[in-house]
Image (tube, rainbow, N blue to C red):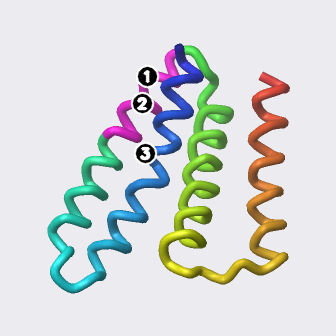
Amino acid sequence: MAWTYLIVGGLFEAGWPIGLKMAETPGRGLTGWLIATLCMAASMALLYLAQREISIGTAYAVWTGIGAAGAFACGLLLYGDPATFGRFAGVGLIISGVVVLKLAH
């Protein structure tokens, strides 16, 4: 169950930067801040639960990796962020590192 908490927490970790980006849109400031705040709280609570069984270093790296890759994907799909080879390579390295941490756990 700890890995489920961690993965869902990582998805919420990707949600708060999206909420902050949304808050920059005129007329959506409060909604964006609320989404960001709720995602932060859920993300941290789930990380807390996951760390009961998963070592802190592994849990934190996986949590931030999922959040970073998720925010990257949302930036591409929702905000037209640049889709360059270097950016994809960087996210690929993050995901590779998360996989190695999971396998070495």
Above or below, 57 relative to 21: above
> What element does badge 1 sit on?
helix
Tell me how far mark 2 sits from mark 3, CA to CA.
9 Å
Tell me how far mark 1 sits from mark 2, CA to CA.
5 Å
Residue indicated by mark 1: 49
Q: Mark 2: give few (<14), some (14-19) or many (20+) Cα within 10 Å.
A: many
> What element does badge 2 sit on?
helix
Residue indicated by mark 3: 12
Residue 79 at what x, y percent from top left? 49, 78
Say which residue appears at 27% left-offset and 74% top-offset.
23
- Mark closer to the observer (1, 3): 3
First in sequence: mark 2 or mark 3? 3
- Mark closer to the observer (2, 3): 3
Residue 11 at what x, y percent from top left? 50, 44
Residue indicated by mark 2: 46
Q: Mark 3: give few (<14), some (14-19) or many (20+) Cα within 10 Å.
A: many
Above or below, 105 relative to 8: above
Q: Which amino acid type is shown beneath numbered disc 1?
A: Leu
Provide the major secondary structure of the magenta segment. Answer: helix
Q: Mark 1: give few (<14), some (14-19) or many (20+) Cα within 10 Å.
A: some
Q: Is residue 29 magenta?
A: no
Asked whether the residues under the numbered discs 1 and 2 touch, taking CB atoms below 8 Å apart as contact, a structural biologist would say yes
Asked whether the residues under the numbered discs 2 and 3 touch, taking CB atoms below 8 Å apart as contact, a structural biologist would say yes
Residue that sits furthest to the front in the current view? 77
